């Protein structure tokens, strides 16, 4: 029956095939027994296919339905019943849509915000580490300069000591040579 209903409502402006099929399934599953709005609509559609004008099609379909006990009030009541079915389907669709938004969109948005926060936090840590590294590099440069300076000072002290040491030893050696030379055998 849902395919027949789909054909009845297919002329709805801008109707999406999938959505129309879903809504017609809901109407079909909740179809009332007896001659009601849906059967009346089918009758009107059948008469319209016979090139009958709309007013005559409505009047003829109602005249036939009236012989089966359908009243104008019952027709309006059952149309309202089916309308309410569609309104409930819209509510259910809205709930499902909100659930989809919540799980597929909002959750991802929260995850994006969480990742952005973590990225910023990591950038701050990187900046802190870069500043720390820059400080260490300055300290290394200063220490290396100090090492060169100390190394030169120590090397200079070594040279001075060795030169002085050699000079003192030379003096002693000269003195010993002079002692041998001038005092020779007397010792």
Image (cartoon, rainbow, N blue to C red):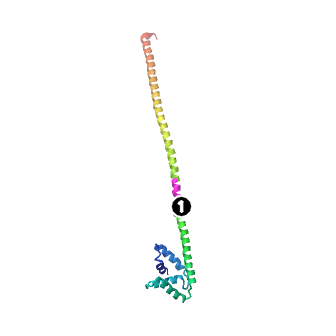
Q: Is 108 a magenta residue? A: yes
Residue found farthest to the bottom: 67
Q: Give the x, y percent position of residue 139.
A: 49, 37
Q: 84 and 152: which one is in front? A: 84
**Residue at the location (55% across, 80% down)?**
79
Q: Is 147 a magenta residue? A: no
Q: Give the x, y percent position of residue 37.
A: 53, 82
Is the magenta region chiefly helix, strand or loop?
helix
The region drawn magenta spans 107-116
Q: Using residue 46 as the reference point, say whether residue 82 is left or right of it.
A: right
**Residue at the location (44% across, 16% down)?**
171
Q: Give the x, y percent position of residue 83.
A: 55, 77
Crowding near the residue tagged with mark 1, few <14, some 14–19, many ≥20 C-alpha atoms within 10 Å? few
Q: 23 and 184: which one is in front? A: 23
**Residue at the location (51% across, 57% down)?**
112
**Residue at the location (47% across, 82% down)?**
54
The image quarter containing residue 175 is top left
Residue bearing mark 1: 107
Q: 168 and 140: which one is in front? A: 140
Q: Give the x, y percent position of residue 170.
A: 43, 18
């Amino acid at each position: 029956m849902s395919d027949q209903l789909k054909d009845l409502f297919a002329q709805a402006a801008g109707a999406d095939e999938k959505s129309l099929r879903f809504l017609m399934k809901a109407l079909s599953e909740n179809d009332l027994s007896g001659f009601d709005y849906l059967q009346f609509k089918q009758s009107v559609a059948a008469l319209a296919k016979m090139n009958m004008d709309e007013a005559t099609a409505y009047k003829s379909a109602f005249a036939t339905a009236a012989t089966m006990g359908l009243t104008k009030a019952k027709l309006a009541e059952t149309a309202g019943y089916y309308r309410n079915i569609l309104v409930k389907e819209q509510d259910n669709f809205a709930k499902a849509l909100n659930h989809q938004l919540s799980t597929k969109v909002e959750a991802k948005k929260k995850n994006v915000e969480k990742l952005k926060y973590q990225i910023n936090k990591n950038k701050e840590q990187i900046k802190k580490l870069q500043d720390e590294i820059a400080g260490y590099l300055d300290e290394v440069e200063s220490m290396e300069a100090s090492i060169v300076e100390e190394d030169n000072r120590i090397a200079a002290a070594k040279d001075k000591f060795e030169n002085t040491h050699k000079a003192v030893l030379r003096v002693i050696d000269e003195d010993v040579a002079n002692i041998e030379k001038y005092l020779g055998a007397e010792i």
